[in-house]
Image: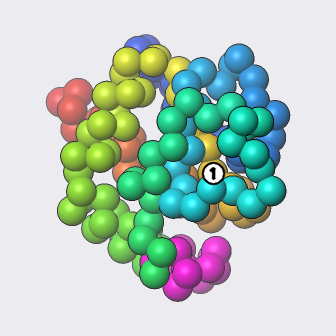
């Protein structure tokens, strides 16, 4: 999944996929380091664990599609309480022009990176108005 803007590109990528120059600046957005992956081999430019959902919310969600809407609402609430970290991430996106938000979840349709990207898209849209 990719957001393309005149000024920048934001991709989502599973961290277990090989790193590529096309990824741009690689930011891990999970609270815990991915299992079985050495930091020296991950190609992560920044680990922004503070932007991940709380451990309690992640555990409750458990990648259950039936809980997706409530997970997104609760995660957005958490992000709104800590907008400073979201603004920091937007600053990095604007600075680096091309960014990949990395996640470790196996589920490519229902994970925190997708919810985070949607939240950031809304913030960026508001910033442009």
Left or right: residue 28 versus residue 91 is right
Numbered range of the magenta stretch: 57-68
Residue that appears at 48% across and 75% down: 55
Using the image as rendered, state which of residue 37 and residue 91 is in the foreground.
37
Q: In this picture, is 28 found above or below 96? A: below
Residue 117 in view, yes or no = no
Residue 25 is inside the magenta segment: no
Q: Which residue is mark 1?
A: 103
Using the image as rendered, state which of residue 107 and residue 38 is in the foreground.
38
Left or right: residue 44 versus residue 57 is right
Percent of width and height locating residue 47: 51, 43
Using the image as rendered, state which of residue 111 and residue 46 is in the foreground.
46
Percent of width and height locating residue 43: 68, 31
For label 1, count other residues whose C-alpha is less than 10 Å away and answer few (under 14), some (14-19) or many (20+). Answer: many
Left or right: residue 65 versus residue 19 is left
Residue 110 in view, yes or no = yes
Percent of width and height locating residue 85: 29, 46
Left or right: residue 54 versus residue 47 is left
* Secondary structure predominantly adopted by residues drawn in magenta: helix
Residue that appears at 80% across and 56% down: 36
Residue 62 is inside the magenta segment: yes
User: Which residue is situated farthest in the left direction here?
Assistant: 129
Number of marks present in the image shown: 1
Residue that appears at 23% across and 51% down: 83
């Amino acid at each position: 999944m990719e957001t393309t803007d005149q000024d920048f590109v934001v991709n989502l990528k599973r961290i277990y996929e090989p790193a590529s120059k096309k990824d741009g600046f690689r930011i891990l957005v999970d609270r815990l380091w991915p299992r079985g992956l050495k930091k020296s081999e991950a190609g992560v430019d920044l680990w922004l664990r503070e932007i991940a959902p709380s451990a309690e919310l992640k555990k409750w969600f458990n990648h259950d599609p039936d809980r997706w809407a409530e997970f997104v609402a609760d995660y957005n609430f958490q992000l709104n309480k800590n907008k400073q970290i979201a603004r920091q991430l937007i600053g990095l996106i604007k600075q680096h022009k091309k960014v990949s938000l990395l996640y470790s979840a196996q589920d490519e349709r229902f994970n925190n990176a997708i919810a985070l990207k949607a939240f950031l898209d809304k913030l960026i849209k508001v910033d442009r108005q």
